[in-house]
Structure formats: C-alpha cells, structure tokens
Amino acid sequence: MPTHEGPGRAMARLTDTIFARASGAVQAAVAVLRLSGPGSGALLAALAGGLPPARRASLRRLRDAAGEVLDQALVLWFPGPASYSGEDCGELHLHGGAAVVSAVEAALLALGARPAEPGEFTRRAFLNGRMDLTQAEAVADLVAAETDGQRRQALRQADGALGQLYGGWSERLTRLLAQQEAAIEFEMDDLPTDLGARARQAAAVLRAEMAAHLQDGHRGERLREGVSVAIVGAPNAGKSSLLNALVGRDAAIVSAQPGTTRDVVECRLVLAGVPVTLADTAGLREASDLIEQEGVRRALDRAAGSDLLLAAFEAGAPPDAATLAALAAAERALVIGTKCDLLPAPENLAGHVVLPTSVRTRDGLGPLLAALERAAIQLAGLAEAPSLTRSRHRAALGEALARLEEGEQARLPELAAEGFRSALLALGRLTGRVEVEQVLDAVFRDFCIGK
C-alpha cells in the first residue's frame, strides 16, 4: 500500500478509476480485470456498449474507441457501496491470451483509467469502511495461504474475529474514559460520586482480558509464518538422514565422514495443517577448521532461535555435552535415538522420553511424525479465541496495556483520563479506527449532560 503520500494527494487519488488483473500474471483460459472508482460505470458502458444489470454476468463484445472488437467477454457491474471496495466496481472476464488482455488494458488507459498500485483495492475498501485493518491484513494472508491451517486462520480474521474483539474492547474503554471525563468535567453536577473508581475497576478487568490475549504463545504468528524446528546433535548422529526421511527426499548430503554438513539445510513441510521449517545443522563438536567452526556457531544459533528442538543422538553411545547443553536450554524439545536397528536406545534422557528411530528400517518414524504433529498443533494450532497474527498487533496491544495500567494506577483523575485516552488510541491503531468523537458521544449519551 502507498504510505508516504500527503493527505491531499491521497484524497485526489481516490477520485481515480483504477484497474488491475485480479487473476494474476500467469496465462490461463480466463483473465479477470477488476475496475474500481467513480468512472467504472462509464468505462464499462463505453467498452461493452452499455451497463449490464447489477450483479449479473452479461456476455458482451468489447470495443475500443475506434469501434474495433477486442474480445467477447463476461461483464459484471457492482455499483457502490455494496462492492468489495465500497465504490462503483466492475469486472471483465476475458479470454486469457496476452494480446487480448493488453488490448483491453490499452483501451482502459485511453478512457482515463490507471493501473492500480499494490493493495489499492483493499486500501479503498478500508478507507470506505468495508473492512478494518485486521481484515485487510487477512485478505493478504488468505491469498498467501499455503496450508489448511493458514487458510482457516485467515478466513476467521477476514470474517472480523480480531476486529470484533478489539472493537468490543474499544467500546468498553470508550465508556470508562467517558466516565472518567465526566467525573472531572462535571463533578458539581448531579452525577454519581464514584465514577472515577468505577472506571478504574473496569480498567482492571479489561486489562486482565487484554493481557491474557497477549500471552498466547505467539500461536497466530507461528501459524502464519511457520514453526521453526532445528535438528541438533553430534557429528554422524544421523541428523541429515533423519531430515531426508522426514521430508521424503535427499535434501541433505549423507556421508560417513564427520562434519559433512557445514551450513544450515532448510526444508519446508506441512504437519497437521501447520507450515514447518525443518533445519539440519552442523554436528556439535570442537572444530579446528574455520568453516566448520562457523557451521557449529550457526547450528547453536538456530537451536537457540527455534520453536522446537530435535536433539538427536546415536543409540548406544552417550550423548555429547554440547547436545545436552542445547537440550537443557530449549523451551520445547524432542529427543531422538537414531540408528536403533543397531543398538537399543534408553527410554529417557535428561528428563525427556526418547523416541527410538531407524532410517534404514523406518522403525519409529511414524511415532516421530505424530509427535511432531502434536507439537506443531500446540505451537501454532487454531485456538477458539482469535489469535494475534502480526508483530504490529502485539506492539499496539502492548502499548494499550501499558497506558491502561498507567490510567488505572494514576492518582490524579486527569492523569487517569490521559492514560485511558492513550490506551484507546493504541487500540484504534489495531483496526485503523481512531475517533475522538466516540468519547464525546458516550459522555452525552450516558450521562444526559445539558439538563
């Protein structure tokens, strides 16, 4: 979305009629051109010889200004405000050939339309009140969704799950701010004397709800961006073989020579609808070679930054100190005993149940995948309550919590009101709706001032 325009320029661009290929750049049987803006109806009428009935597909011959036939296409007309962007909109379902699309785009340019900028249709939908910012972000997430879990999360957010939650909090915060403002401005009027205390009590309840929502273990971000899993262990512990077995292809080089893996090898897979990035790392040991030393450093960094650690050790051999240290530092880990076709693995290690596996016989791979799926669901599974999906949400909500606590603990009523007002502004940044008039409306509606 454009973010650096002045308000005058931004408003001027809202009067433009824009178009873009909604079906993407890949050649296909059908290409869809979408139009939005005040001139959409006139453009459709000029190309198609008249406007079709609203929201009904109509087969028309499209002609340019010189009367040349460009294509025979389905034309749809969506008068605003009941459209995606809230403006007059149209769609042209063309044959997908590049020459056809180019000719129609040239005709639209000649009629005064301009190509849309990235995200401009959704930006107009937000500016016209068709969706809030969380829903607009969900549109992008839905387009980019690669897994079933990502699709479900994006659909819930697009349906307004997050916006409704934050909107409800904003309404409650508006009411308690109105109570605090009334206690200050109209203390001599016939109003309850405990308005300030009521506001602080309501603020404490609201703050507890917001804090619980914020402490969600980053589920939404993990589902949107993927769960990070790192395989660590000593050289020749079977890490690369394990990676290849889990992803079903030869992604990492396997060799009997220790120190073969020097860099992090990443593979993507989907477990229980959750995207997972699985990383094979260099064997943990005291290395004399500079390149291997860098590989070990990267392995330790990846282990420290991963959501889940797979600590692999060769069955029948004592695990090395470096692997045990990484295991001890991990918040969540699975311990895997490899090469169990040769020697049995212990049942427990450092307080963890050992999952015995053999890549050669494929014994234990099923239980390991099941354990990985359970961990992925716990880390990023869909919760009943809507989840935060972006760092922007987390930052704004953290700011609202801090300001709300300041207002709740302030000794002076004016400072309490300022804290509540700042919290309301931070909540408004989540949805993109910040309206000072809401506070005034609540004051006059709830307390009948002006008697």
Image (tube, helix red, strand yellow):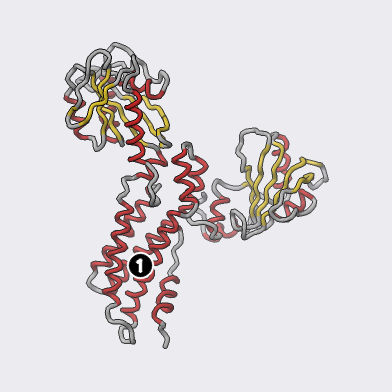
Image location (x, y in percent) of residue 388: 38, 49
Q: Amino acid at mark 1?
A: Arg
Q: Residues within 10 Å of mark 1 (few under 14, many from 20)?
A: many
The structure residue drawn at horizontal position 18% and vertical position 30%, both measured from the top left corner, is 325
The image quadrant that residue 228 belongs to is top left
Image location (x, y in percent) of residue 94: 71, 40
- Say what secondary structure mark 1 lies in: helix
Q: Please, is residue 122 above or below residue 259 in the view?
A: below
Residue at image mark 1: 421
The structure residue drawn at horizontal position 42% and vertical position 21%, both measured from the top left corner, is 248
Residue 28 visible here: yes
The image quadrant that residue 100 belongs to is top right
Q: Quadrant of the C terminus?
A: bottom left
Image location (x, y in percent) of residue 314: 23, 18
Q: Nearer the viewer, residue 221 or 425?
A: 221
Q: Nearer the viewer, residue 13 or 268?
A: 268
- Count the marks: 1
Q: Residue furthest bottom?
A: 451
Classify residue 298 as left or right of residue 48: left
Q: Residue furthest top?
A: 256
Q: Residue furthest right?
A: 67
The structure residue drawn at horizontal position 28% and vertical position 67%, both measured from the top left corner, is 407
Image location (x, y in percent) of residue 159: 49, 53
Q: Nearer the viewer, residue 209 or 100?
A: 209
Residue 105 visible here: no
